[in-house]
Image (cartoon, helix red, strand yellow):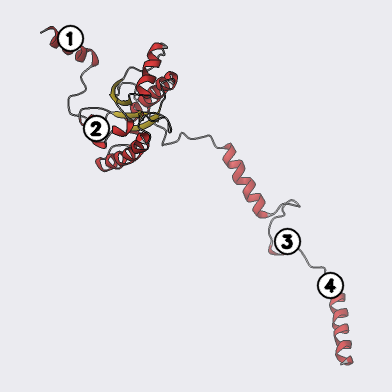
């Protein structure tokens, strides 16, 4: 097999000599591509360009950002459990915490008592949003009442979806008797959230009576 070895050595020498005579040009140059700065790949350059574009472009306002309707006063119904959240509302009052007055509170013995039908009835009567509030987990007077409230709330959400109402019109919160500040904050947040959604489509027609007129009608009825 020695002649074969000799052959291969000869061909190697030939190819080496060829390489010396005509050094290989870089591929890009051969194809006529433009020169890039050393150490930067094409992918890296593209990435940098995209990054620069991203940083240079002015931030467009997000379409999902809710537009607050200042001309609309939402009507909120709050179902508050007797042992924690209702007492929390009391604490807010005693502490003279300032918060939105656009809600009516209904006391229930436990948040687990709030059946989806209660919420739907509130919407039927003209509520724009419904807040269900109870004790923190572990504090429920009836042990598992607030866990039941979570189940009921999920069912209510599904029903609202069927009726074509936005999910943001209902809210579930845990507020203790000592959390007067939290009660005020939650009410303020929820009022603004519902204000952004606008009036409920389930509200009966003609309920856009000004609050002053409503109060006047109530006073007139009492005077009779
Ligand atoms: S007693 Fe408050 S949630 Fe049950």
Q: Nearer the viewer, mark 4 or mark 3?
A: 4
Lower sequence index among marks 3 and 2 = 3
3 vs 2, front mark? 2
Q: Which mark is residue 118?
A: 2
Of label 2 and label 4, which has the lower sequence position? 4
Residue 12 point in image, percent of width and height: 85, 80
Mark 2–mark 4 contact, CB under 8 Å?
no
Neighbourhood count class around disc 3 (C-alpha, 10 Å): few under 14, some 14–19, many 20 upward: few
Query: In whole angstroms, how far apart are the C-alphas of marks 3 and 2?
Result: 77 Å
Q: Name the residue tied to disc 4.
A: 19
Kindly identify which residue carries mark 1. Answer: 219
User: Is disc 1 surrounded by few (<14), some (14 to 19) or many (20+) residues within 10 Å?
Assistant: few
Residue 124 position, x and y percent, is 20, 31
Q: Quadrant of the C terminus?
A: top left
Can you see residue 211? yes
For the residues labelled 4 and 1, the Cα–Cα distance comes to: 106 Å
Q: Are marks 4 and 1 in contact (CB under 8 Å)?
A: no
N-terminal label among 3 and 1? 3
Disc 2, SS: helix
Q: CA distance from mark 4 to mark 3?
A: 18 Å
Crowding at mark 4 (Cα within 10 Å: few <14, some 14-19, many 20+): few
Report which quarter residue 204 is drawn in. Answer: top left
Q: Is residue 39 above or below residue 141?
A: below
Residue holding disc 3? 29
* Above or below, comparing residue 1 to residue 197 in the picture: below
Q: In front: 126, or 33?
A: 126
């Amino acid at each position: 097999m020695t002649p074969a070895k000799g052959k291969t050595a000869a061909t190697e020498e030939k190819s080496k000599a060829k390489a010396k005579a005509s050094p290989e040009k870089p591929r890009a140059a051969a194809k006529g591509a433009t020169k890039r700065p050393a150490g930067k790949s094409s992918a890296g350059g593209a990435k940098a360009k995209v990054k620069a574009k991203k940083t240079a472009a002015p931030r467009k306002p997000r379409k999902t950002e809710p537009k607050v309707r200042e001309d609309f006063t939402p009507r909120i119904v709050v179902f508050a459990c007797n042992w924690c959240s209702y007492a929390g509302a009391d604490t807010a009052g005693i502490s003279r915490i300032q918060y939105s007055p656009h809600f009516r509170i209904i006391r229930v013995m436990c948040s687990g008592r709030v059946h989806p039908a209660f919420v739907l009835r509130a919407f039927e009567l003209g509520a724009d949003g419904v807040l269900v509030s109870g004790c923190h987990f572990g504090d429920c007077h009836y042990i598992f009442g607030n866990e039941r409230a979570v189940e009921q709330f999920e069912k209510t959400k599904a029903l609202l979806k069927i009726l074509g109402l936005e999910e943001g019109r209902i809210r579930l919160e845990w507020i203790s008797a000592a959390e007067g500040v939290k009660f005020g904050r939650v009410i303020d947040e929820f009022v603004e959230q519902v204000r952004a959604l606008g009036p409920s489509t389930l509200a009966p027609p003609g309920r856009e009576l000004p609050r002053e007129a409503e109060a006047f009608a109530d006073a007139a009825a009492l005077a009779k």
